Image (spheres, rainbow, N blue to C red):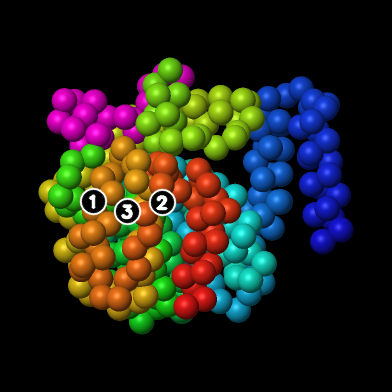
Amino acid sequence: MKNRILIGTLLSLTILFGSVTCTSTLVKSGIAYERWKSDLDKKELQIAPWHWVYLEGGEGAEKILLVHGFGADKDNWTRFAKWLTPKYTVVAVDLPGFGENDRLPDQDYNIMAQVKRLDEFATKLGWTKFHIVGNSMGGAISGVYAATYPEKVISLGLFAPSGVNSPEKSELAKNLEKGKNNLVTNSPEEFQEMINFVFVKPPSIPSFLVSYFSDKAIANAGFNKLIFQQIRKGDFPLQERMNKIKAKTLILWGDTDRVLSVSGAGVLEKGILGSKKVILKDMGHAPMLERPEEVANVYLEFLKK
């Protein structure tokens, strides 16, 4: 613990006083500092052909698995996890095709394929029963996981999940019909537009990290487009399996979500027996990033009941 405190102090001084001039080192320090504040450590394991990279922290007997959305990665959960690690063991994972996991062009990245891989990952960790939370694409994966492996899931958190045929079209859905995908960015300007599209009030992030995330999104644009096409094909996997979900379920959505229509929350509430629906005012598509403490409090209160 003392080493953690020392590392965190040095990293904070580095960021505040700019003693590190190398951008890549500054980025690593900034990301490491955020993880340190949430008591998360980076870990890795191999399940051929995938190299799994994940964050783990906390010492609670109960476990929570956090699953990111499209174009995102494990660090989308870092600030949210800060409020969970005092009581739970938490893992936030990079799914195949995203973050530091492998991008293999000959593989499928549809929801069912990712559900199977996620179960292999959980099995490798030795997790037999746990809570699972997902946002956007990760919400669809988490929900289908809960429907496929009900004996393993204690509770399910669906944060603005995809995989639902919402009664009302979202702004993104309308834009896709016109050939514009707000979630795939090819320039710094498009990245900033995407940030403004996803959030009502974007989270406070140092400018050097914004540039880093922008560069990553641009570099991965081609592969992200390929994955988006795969997960968008045809069906609504979460809605089609929602009646098989047995775990207690929290459906959490922002009322100002432009990516996926909040009207989908009502579909899930009706289809998942005993589920709880929470709609947050003036909230965008990634609640755990936009207002992490508030969303964590809602989630922790849900777990208590």
Q: Is residue 14 magenta?
A: no
Residue 148, visible in the rendered structure? no
Residue at position x 76%, y 22% from top? Answer: 21
Front-most of residues 44 and 276: 276
**Residue 34 visible in the shown view:** yes
Residue at position x 51%, y 69% from top? Answer: 301
The residue wearing badge 2 is 280
The residue that label 1 is drawn on is 263
Q: CA distance from mark 1 to mark 2?
A: 13 Å
Where does residue 183 sit, x and y in percent of width and height? 34, 33
How crowded pointer 3 is (Cα within 10 Å; few <14, some 14-19, many 20+) is rated as: many
Q: Quadrant of residue 294?
A: bottom right
Residue 282 quadrant: top left
Tag 1: residue type?
Ser
- Tell me which residue sits at (47%, 70%) in the image: 302
Q: Earlier in the sequence, mark 1 or mark 3?
A: 3
Range drawn in magenta: 171-188
In this figure, which residue is indicated by the disc labeled 3?
161
User: Could you tell me which secondary element the residue under label 2 belongs to?
Assistant: strand
Residue ID at (61%, 25%): 207
Q: In the rendered structure, are the residues bearing label 1 and label 3 in contact, judged by CB atoms less than 8 Å apart? A: no
Q: CA distance from mark 1 to mark 3?
A: 11 Å
From the viewer's perspective, is 228 left or right of 287? Answer: left
In this image, 58 relative to 261: left or right? right
Residue 225 pos. (x, y %): 29, 34
Is residue 185 on the magenta stretch?
Answer: yes
